[in-house]
Image: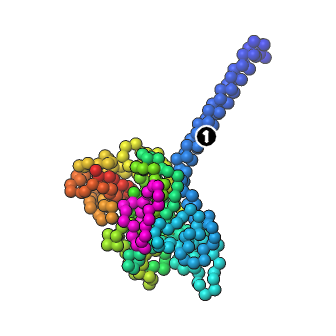
Amino acid sequence: MLDNASGATGWHNICSAECTIQTMHKHLFFVLLLIICFSGASAQNILRNPNFVEKYDCPQYLDELFKCKYWRSPTKSTPGYYNSCYDTIAGMGPGPGVPQSWWAYQHSNDNAYVGIYGLHYGGYREYIATTFSPLIPGETYRVSMRISLADSVAIASAGLGVYFYKDAVPDYHTHGRIFVMPQVDYTHYGIIVNDTEWVSLVGTFVADSAYTNLVIGNFHSDTDVMKLSVTIRPGKKINYYLIDSVALEMVEDAGIGIYNAVTATIAVYPNPAGGRYTFSFGRIADYNLTLYNAVGVAVVKKEHVVQKDITIERGSLPAGHYFYTAETAGSIAGRGRILLE
């Protein structure tokens, strides 16, 4: 049995311990709450209606993007809007439905997506555009989307990209190519031939202006873009891609240079680079390293790289954005972008 003094001291110690534990729990909860809040903030999608679900009306024909809220065509061309709400019109076939449409059979988690011509006879192109709150100059943004080749066409290609601009909407009186250089170019993903599953494309860029608009499409010339005739099936000799789940998110910068959102195991420095640049591999393996220019042409190839670091002389390469892929054991180990000044 404890006497009064020792008992009081004992209860005081127990109470102090419990209070300390409760305080620690409160602090831990607060820290976790901050982490969750900031993590959510850094990954917030800036775009409205990124999955094309919201609509003014159900599409009934193949060229009714104007029925999809917050998205538009920036040119005189007419991209397609596909939604499961479509009711088949007698004699019109599957039309702009989901999963079955005139172009393809493709499911979507939200039962809606859009479609654009990447290549077509006579230079015809289609693009989609949207408006958002101004970006913060100097911040790094991640741009991602899912695409799938329509299974009724016979041409697959690379070359999709995203162009950002601000203020007034440019007056593109054309049915063809928009002659601009996109800030985000997915050429380094190669030719997308998958027509049964969605392929995720991810790229990053540092905003150099308070951009308020973006345009998605193929900005390369017909002769420059990488393409492939899918001869295993008959189809229209054109190129058509479905697009879904578009996201524009501000991300934490990697520190110095351009953030590589795809992999943290392969780094390139300095980035931007001058006369030479170095690739550093997180683990030693047998890599095939390829550097592509802005239109997808391989300009540097290094095969069977087995050292942890490799330094490459710039040589006569002009200034601009370049993309790299590192393959090992037949699969992509990393990809990213480098700026040569």
Which segment did they paint magenta? 160-182
In this rendering, does residue 199 appear at all? no
Residue 92 highlighted magenta (yes or no): no
Answer whether residue 174 is magenta in the image.
yes
Along the viewing direction, whichever of 195 and 296 lies nearer the viewer: 296
Q: Nearer the viewer, residue 300 or 65?
A: 65
Q: Nearer the viewer, residue 330 or 269?
A: 269
Looking at the image, which residue sits at the far bottom? 91
Question: Quick one: which residue is furthest to the left in this view?
Answer: 315
Q: Which type of secondary structure does the marked residue at label 1 adopt?
A: helix
Residue 48 lies left or right of residue 119; in this view the side is right
* Residue type, numbered disc 1: Leu
Q: Position of residue 237 (x, y in %)?
A: 41, 81
Task: Confirm whether residue 66 shows in the render.
Answer: yes
Residue depicted at 55% across the width and 43% down the height? 38
Magenta stretch secondary structure, dominant: loop
Point out residue 113 in the picture as x, y percentages from the top left corner.
55, 68
Name which residue lies at 43% across and 54% down.
Answer: 204
